Image (cartoon, rainbow, N blue to C red):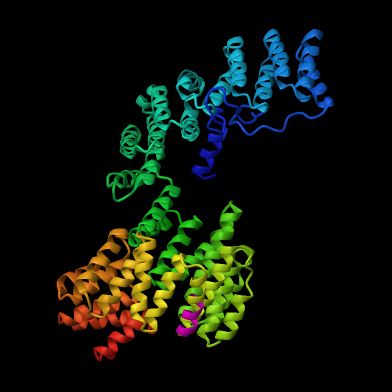
Amino acid sequence: MTPSLRRSRLAAAALLTLAALAVQAQPGTPVPAAPTSPAPIIEPAAPAVTTPAAAVQRAEKAQASALTAELFYEVLMGELTARTGDPGSGYALVLDAARRSRDGKLFQRAVEIALQARSGDAALAAARAWKETLPESREARRFELQILIALNRIGETAEPLRAELAATPQVERPFLMAVIARNYARATDKKLAASVVEQALADELKSPATGGAAWSTVGRLRLAAGDTSGALEAAQRGQEADPSSDGPAMLALELMDPGQPLAEPLVKRYLAGPKALPELRVAYARVLVEGRRYEDASAELAALTVARPELPEPWLLLGSLQTQARQDAAAESSLKRYIGLADTQRDAEARSRGQTQAFLLLAQLAERRKDFTGAEHWLGRIDSTEDLVGAQTRRAALLVRQGKLPQARELVRGLPERTADEKKQKFLAEVQLLRDAKQYQAAYDMLTEASTASPQDTDLIYDRAMVAEKLNRLDEMERLLRRLIELKPDNQNAYNALGYSLADRKVRLEEARTLIRKAVQLAPEDPFIADSLGWVEFRLGNIDEAMRILEAAYKRRPDPEIGAHLGEVLWAKGQRDRALSIWKEAHLVDADNETLQETLKRLRVKL
């Protein structure tokens, strides 16, 4: 059993039973139906009893707990009255019987009747009567706590929460606190929720045994309240209390952002420890990928595959990054390693998704080396109906590579279109086939017709602009990209495409640099946007700055187009041997790259 699975099971056994009542109510507001049992974590209630026989059954169970005949009759009448449309009277009868018999099951039933009647105040009154009658009952306190949270009466939860913490065994408290964070995060007044929980956890925050988990709970509630600085402080204090606790590191991982530079060191410090969970290292790698820090992500995953080679997921992620970096041999090895280990994944859905991704990537690698039979083999192993569109689209692309455009278009047109999104994806896939086949006019005509029907669709506008450029309709391209910027001012691709086009044509270079700098601001880790910035600096005559930017971009992503630009800058600086070396490297990756071919032809270079 992995540590995370063991923890999730322990968390499921935590003794707190805060309800997952998805209602944001005020005192006196009806609430959803209650669960029939408060332990370990309250689940939604089953429907109310609907037959007289069931009501009698409940009453017989009550009689089995040594109720007098009078109380037995009272319980029976309460159940029947609740069933026949008078839950208020039924509730009163059952609650009275509970008080007189001091029977916890009857108190619980009174709470359930009130909640099924959507009367939060009555349910709270029953739970509190239960607690007063049976002060040692943890179930009574749990129900009181859950109802108070559901009613957003957060200020009243401090005392029962402290009591629940005190009654929970020390070993279970870290997992209990994870449940606390999840449930209190639903409160309307999130700042108050964070404050109340912090007060209730005062002793836990000071304890070395629970400090890491307690501060993580406080930090998550601060984060839910929008207090990122307070959340970071909580993560720092939690790690100081217990460096091996995974809670502060997980919180810091959520806080990782260019605006929070102190969050990542907490994650790294935890991962350097001997008890670091491999799942958290994988999560860290995913965050790095989202930030386009591909080299750092690859390094984390490579270290994990060495330390824990039996884990499948790191191999899949590493293979994906290696494919993207065009490290084809290493990528193929990693992906095949994943396929060999995939059956050890317990989550069937995750296993199916992972295998599909691996097969698609292996098909892509085979296609790069023009092994179309091999690519078809890997695509043929995809048996998930959900991934049919992706597999068939790749098959269509293979047909285009073999000069079979009509067959490719028919294959895509035959795909299902059960939703509007599927219909759009089919359309864009067919447009891409035409672009791959250099049938730019046909692609442009399709996009123009679709844009007329959906003039605000930014995906169509961008694709139409890119095809217009291929047709040398540069004014139209610029008009479309400016329209896209107007509709979506945070679209970095629009700024980058327009700026690069100007730079490549050596026109309005200052404007080009301004546009590309805006794109960099929106996506600072994107190596292709960095490539555009390096290219415009080169066009402006800033060769040293251009080389610095392009060197960094090529290191981050050794793409043939970036290599073509870097090689030209090196050639201009007189470093011709190094330029030739980079061009040869780019040529091995993709000999058909248009930018590379144009560069070599213009400079009259033969490799």
**Residue 396 located left or right of residue 574:** right
Q: Residue at x 53, y 80 (%)?
A: 398
Q: Is residue 156 above or below residue 530?
A: above
Q: In the rendered view, does 13 fall on the left or right side of 554? A: right
User: Which residue is painted at 30% across and 36% down in the image?
Assistant: 233
* Magenta run includes residue 595: no
x and y percentages locating residue 13 in the rendered image = 57, 32
Q: Give the magenta part as a residue range.
A: 439-447
Count of numbered badges drawn on the protein: 0
Residue 372, x across and y down, in percent: 53, 82
Q: Quadrant of the C terminus?
A: bottom left
Answer with the quarter of the image where residue 604 lies. bottom left
Which residue is more in the foreground, 176 or 439? 439
Q: Is residue 440 magenta?
A: yes
Using the image as rendered, state which of residue 151 and residue 340 is in the foreground.
Answer: 151
Give residue 273's quadrant in the image: top left
In x, y percent, where is residue 321? 41, 64
**Where 106 falls versus 494 (above or below)?**
above
Say whether residue 420 is left or right of residue 239.
right
- Tell me, yes or no, if residue 271 can be seen here: yes
* Of 132 and 271, the residue lying toward us: 132
Eyeballing the image, is 77 above or below 152?
above
Image point 17% across, 69% down: which residue? 545
For the question of whether residue 340 can be seen, the reply is no
| Magenta stretch, main secondary structure class | helix
Q: Quadrant of the N terminus?
A: top right
Which of the 4 quarters of the picture holds residue 277?
top left
Viewer-proximal residue among 472 and 62? 472
Residue 47 lies, in percent from the top left, at 72, 33
